[in-house]
Image (cartoon, helix red, strand yellow):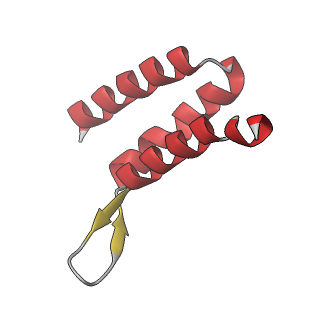
């Protein structure tokens, strides 16, 4: 049970990220939010390099701020 519970934070974090990357368009389904995808790619790379949740979140917020200023 404890080994299974170790995956819960990863699953919740992934669900929150994917929910933010999709836009619901009425009954037609979902469309991708390209702004979030542009931010997710470098943020994932930063997460893999540093393996720190704090650095990853701060970098993701900083990258999102830059993308929103540009677009």
Badge count? 0
Classify residue 13 as left or right of residue 10: left
Residue 43 vs 33, above or below: the answer is: above
Would residue 8 appear left or right of 66 to someone viewing this image?
A: right
Tell me which corner region of the image, top left, top right, bottom left or bottom right, holds residue 48. Answer: top right
Seen at 63% across and 32% down, the residue is 45
Residue drawn at the location 24% of the way across and 83% of the way down:
27
For the N terminus, the quadrant is top right
In the image, 29 versus 45, the foreground residue is 29
Q: Quadrant of the C terminus?
A: top left
In terms of depth relative to the viewer, which is nearer, 34 or 9? Answer: 9
Residue at the image point whose x is 33% and y is 78% from the top: 29
Q: Nearer the viewer, residue 64 or 19?
A: 19
Where residue 11 appears, as percent x and y from the top left, is 58, 46
Q: Residue furthest bottom?
A: 28
Across and down, in percent, residue 42 comes to: 54, 34
Residue lying farthest front? 1
Residue 53 position in % (x across, y down): 56, 21
User: Vertically, is 6 above or below 34?
Assistant: above
Q: Identify whether 34 is placed above or below 39.
A: below
The residue under the point 52% across, 43% down is 12
Residue 54 place in picture, x, y as percent: 51, 15
């Amino acid at each position: 049970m404890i080994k299974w519970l170790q995956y819960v934070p990863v699953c919740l974090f992934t669900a929150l990220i994917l929910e933010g990357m999709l836009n619901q368009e009425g009954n037609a389904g979902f469309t991708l939010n390209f702004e979030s995808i542009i931010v997710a790619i470098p943020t994932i790379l930063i997460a893999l390099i540093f393996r720190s949740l704090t650095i990853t979140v701060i970098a993701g917020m900083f990258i999102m701020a830059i993308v929103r200023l540009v677009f």
